[in-house]
Image: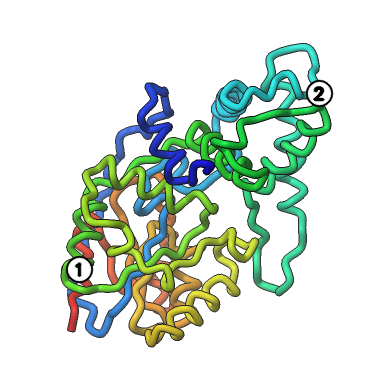
Amino acid sequence: MPLTLSEYADALAERDLIWPQVPAPKPVKAKPSIALLPGVQVVLWDVYGTLLRTADGGFTLFPNPEVRLQVALEKTILEFNMWNSMYRKPGPPWQSMMPQYRDYVERVAMVPTKLKGDFTGVDLVSVWKAILDRLFDKDYKYDQGVYGNEDQLSEKIAYFFHRNLQATEARAGAVRAMTDLAEVGVTQGLLADGQSFTYVQLVQALTKQGLVMPMREIIRTEATLFSHQMAIRKPSQSLFRRAVEQLEAIGVAPEQTLHVSCRLPTDLVPAKAVGMKTALLVSEKIGLEAPADLIKDSQTRPDRLLTDITQITSVVQPG
């Protein structure tokens, strides 16, 4: 039996690998607004930038500086023994892989969405599957007993690549905040720009911070929606409408839902537009997107402002 993605992530964690690190947070001066929001039954967390700190503030496929992409490609080529099956050019391996990676990402990004008001999202697994198809043309071989079929291999490559491309770590207090909510019976879900490996990546980071409670007892699948599932990304209107439909299917209305994120324009404004309550996390400069005009406007300003993620337990309490 091939390893599941979770088992593969655990196996990587046991190896003495060097992963990129997230820089220390730079605090932001802000006054919290953490009065109780009556009636909230579900908390929907954003992931990259909110539960997971990143050097970029959110999910990215093209980090700055570009050397991070070069290193991630180089490590991925070495880890999965791709070099002998690549169409090689003079220079280091990443130079041959870089144009392919850019080309496939840009091709996917240019695919039009089905509905007006939506924005195309890029599935990193499909990008690596396309790259693999070229490798198979040159008789690429891998251990199917470990990695599984081509789709399973593509997902594991995407996970490994992204771990090297973009450093992530659980935000300080994330485990405490999520566990405290779960222990008092508050339903939690995820609404985020994410990939098929994002859930595993989140579990790995929370476990490193000390997570003991099983994740399935904290995050409810029916209340979780990642952008890759719809091939679109925030602030796509369809993504937020689908989230509302999922919640209504389990008996939760939009006004009983609180979306928590560090980004107003792409996350909280469209969440508020579909009837959700919103909480802006203002705990560091990286990733914070809170234009003054949106803060001042009663139609877009967040319902609550958190300066520490653990303050969520003051805002949301079971009725």
User: Where 226 sits versus 184, above or below?
Assistant: above
User: Would residue 158 be visible to someone looking at this image?
Assistant: yes
Q: Tag 2: Cα neighbours inside 10 Å, few (<14), some, or many (≥20)?
A: few
Residue with the mark numbered 2: 87
Q: Which mark is residue 208?
A: none
Q: CA distance from mark 2 to mark 1?
A: 56 Å
Q: Position of residue 67 (x, y in %)?
A: 57, 24
The residue sitting at 78% across, 33% down in the picture is 136
Residue with the mark numbered 1: 34
Q: Earlier in the sequence, mark 2 or mark 1?
A: 1
| Quadrant where the C terminus is found in the figure | bottom left
In this view, the mark in front (2 or 1)? 2
Tell me where residue 85 sits by quadrant.
top right
Residue extending furthest toward the front: 1
Residue type, mark 2 in image: Tyr
Horizontal placement of 73 versus 224: left or right?
Answer: right
